Amino acid sequence: MAAVTLSNVVKRFGVYEIIHGANIDIADGEFVVFVGPSGCGKSTLLRMVAGLEDISGGEIAIGGKVMNDVEAAERGIAMVFQSYALYPHMTVEQNLSFGLRMNGNPKADTERRVKRAAEILCIDELMQRRPKQLSGGQRQRVAIGRAIVREPQVFLFDEPLSNLDAELRVQMRVEISRLHKELGVTMIYVTHDQTEAMTLADRIVVLKAGNVEQIGAPLDLYDDPANRFVAGFIGSPKMNFLAAKVVETGDGAATIELVNHAGARFKKPLQTTPPAVGADVVLGVRPEHFFDAGQGDCDISVKADVAEHLGSVSYVYADAGDTELIIEREASRHRASGDHLVVSIKAGKALLFDTKGARIR
Amino acid sequence: MRYQNATAYRFLAPYLLIFSVFWVWPIISSFLISFQATRTVPWRWAPTFNWGRLIGDPAFFNALKNTLLILVIQVPVMISLAIVMAVLLNSPLLKARGLYRFAFFAPVVVGEVAYSAVFRLMFNLNFGIINKLLNSVGLPSIDWFSNVTPAMALIMIAVTWRWAGYNAIILLAGLQSIPDDVYEAATLDRVSKVKQFFYITLPLLKPIIVFCAVLSIIGTMQLFTEPFLITERGGPGGGTETLGLLLYRQGFRSLNFGYASAVAYTMAGLAIAITLVQLWLTKEPK
């Protein structure tokens, strides 16, 4: 087990800088998820930790030792690839033991490690099969097993569930979470799926275009995002954003008026100096933070467009003039297209952002 | 449905006609000819005449021995060389990869007569560059064309030069189909590059290697150009005569088509037999 520290890590491909000075501290035994949209640099960052990509600037340390010039094989890490990267011509048993056999590990110890991994992942029955004779989920288990037998200091996962169907993905997510508890090893997991990030992580690192946007526990990111990008990326369905204006300030608060809902205004207490009167701002409201009419600080009227009934809740996609809102309703099973709906916003549950996306607290 | 089929066959008819006349019929005809004595006029039906002669013909066994010798030595050497070339071509460290790929493939494009003439000049006893190079490192000149062993070596060198690059390009396609992350996984498993080559690259390349080997076996069984043009019709003294050359000599110089047909069928039979044995030996477990 080991802590992982990334200090001002930069990655350049030719003249293009892909990672712009990432600083991330991962504690020993922690499960950290790198999340972000495609092309944000999360896989590149993981591959730099693994030693599969050179580091253009900064330092990566594992267990307190700087690894910049240490070969991938010597970093004490194991990686599970998106494509599984199993050796197609070897049986499951050979796949698991290959690395140990090639390095002259004692036979008895190799057998012990392979047996343990097989038991943990319930793949004992598959040992003589080849990868092409396995299902996607079984291949994924073998790939994880190959990482386990190495008994690494750090596990790296590069979008390991993205090739699985939805049901299997949920099942494997639970298994990976259980594996982390069982092994207690530091794990770094890359995904573009914020649900995976929220359910697996001790802490999430949100990346956008090579920059670390925010690091924190899943619910901290959900409840207290640092900016509009994190607010929009974390949470499913995503947060709604409404155009607004500051119409009055004073007493440590700002009065906000929604641009496309004349008269819809409320007072929002702020910890920092409020924006100037007349400044454009953006109001962020999560789908579950729309309340019944009259129960919040200001009501707005919207026209229901489409409703998705999921059983326990329904999501109403509504036209709110400038934007489409997603509203979570518990009792709207019969909501139909074209219905008018009045919902209420509570000042305490709404987040405020400036036009550049920075949070106004 | 039947009408539709008829229409399809009418469209196919020109091709099928040409295919039947110039492909199917010669195959059947040559098989029938192999059972006829063709040195008499008219040809007469003599089922054991050519096949009986084949079994006891020292020229046939000499050609068979030469062909198999080339097959056993040249094909493995060429395939091994092609694998090395393919791995080098696939290296990310290599600059101007396209140029090398073209250079490796170019010998196949060069005209057979031109390349044979150049080889004859290069290996000339008195002024060939090869003997000059041998002399420059203190080795004596070799008379490549007058002694059987050097002449056979020359044939093998020439065939290898011509076809190694071609096979390397096919193998390169195979190499490029092996995913990078398999090697990355092996690297993280602390497997050295050399072991990766022997335990990952070679096993995964096996189907392509078998394919190249089968092509080479068929090509070697039909080998004609090099012994005909470079060592002057299988010289010295039939020392480099191959089955292909024997067939030509019997069929088109002695006009003994019956015997030439028997030789042709023997060549095809041997190529099929060797290929089947090889496919069986390298069969993937289910």
Image (cartoon, grey):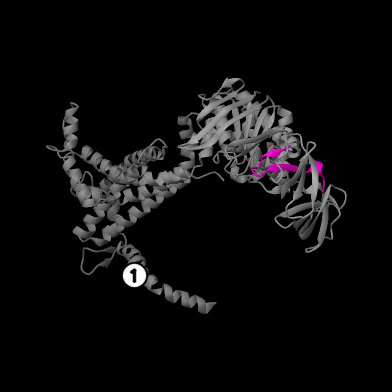
* Relative to A248, B4 lies left or right: left
Name the image quarter holding residue B133: top left
Across and down, in percent, residue A125 comes to 68, 39
Where are the magenta residues, as a range? Answer: A345-361
Secondary structure beneath dot 1 equals helix
Q: Give the residue at x 76% y 38%.
A: A223
Is A46 in front, or is B213?
A: A46
Across and down, in percent, residue B144 comes to 18, 39
Amino acid bearing label 1:
Val
* Relative to B74, A91 lies left or right: right
Asked if the stretch drawn in magenta spans residue A350, the answer is: yes
Instruction: Identify the residue under disc 1.
Output: B21
Asked if the stretch drawn in magenta spans residue A65, the answer is: no
| Residue B221 visible to the viewer | yes
Name the image quarter holding residue A309: bottom right
Across and down, in percent, residue B168 comes to 37, 43
Q: Is residue A116 above or below residue A302?
A: above
